[in-house]
Image (tube, rainbow, N blue to C red):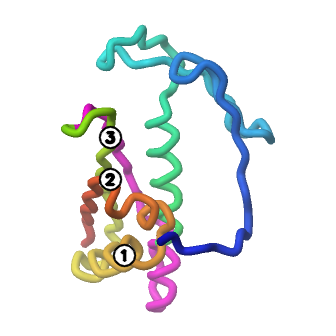
Amino acid sequence: MVDAIKPLYTAHGTATGGRNGHTRSDDGIVDLDLSVPKEMGGPGKPNTGTPEHLFAAGYAACFGGALDYVAKQHKKDASKATVKCAVSIGPREKGGFGLAVVLDVTDASLPQSELQSFVDEAHEKICPYSHATRGNVDVKVVAHGA
């Protein structure tokens, strides 16, 4: 069963030509040529991206916002945290392709145990990307505090 949402904002994008094409948000903020990387048997054209680039950037930004939200609920500030997101793609045992994600969060202004607690709460309760991937994508979350 899927949890229904009350939409607050909707982004729109269009891709033409799949992984060797072009993708663009309807407002033009995202406007990117795509190419299959050499590691996946493609041409790996310079100055092109992949759907995994877009997913990694979006997840990192969203998770950073969720982390700062959680920290503020605890009267702390995580607005300067750095969230690195690595998105890997590869064949699945059952066929087709799947993703794996590593979120690497650093904030030297917070003690390690406190940052870890905030990261865990953001991942389990707040971040919509984390909700969307749960049970579908292997997501590892690593925290580096003071």
Q: Which residue is mark 2?
A: 137
**Pointer 2 and pointer 3: residues touching (CB < 8 Å)?**
yes
**From which residue to which does the magenta span run?**
67-92
Please give the name of the residue rendered at 46% of the width and 61% of the height, measured from the top-left corner. Answer: 132
Across and down, in percent, residue 71 comes to 45, 82
Q: Which residue is mark 3?
A: 98
**Pointer 3 and pointer 1: residues touching (CB < 8 Å)?**
no
Across and down, in percent, residue 47 comes to 53, 18
Is label 2 or label 1 in front? 2
**Residue 133 lies in the magenta stretch:** no
The quadrant in which residue 94 appears is top left
- In depth, the one of 68 and 56 nearer the eye is 56
Please give the name of the residue rendered at 47% of the width and 64% of the height, measured from the top-left corner. Answer: 64
Mark 1 nearby-residue class (10 Å; few <14, some 14–19, many ≥20): few
Is label 3 or label 1 in front? 3
Q: Which amino acid is tagged 2?
A: Val
Mark 3 nearby-residue class (10 Å; few <14, some 14–19, many ≥20): some
Which comes before the other along the chain, label 3 or label 1?
3
- In depth, the one of 26 and 116 nearer the eye is 26
Q: Which amino acid is tagged 1?
A: Glu
> Height in image: 41 above or below 108?
above
Cα–Cα gap, marks 3 and 1: 21 Å
Please give the name of the residue rendered at 44% of the width and 67% of the height, measured from the top-left corner. Answer: 131
In the figure, is residue 44 to the left or right of 31? left
> Of helix, strand and loop, which one carries label 1?
helix
Across and down, in percent, residue 95 comes to 27, 34
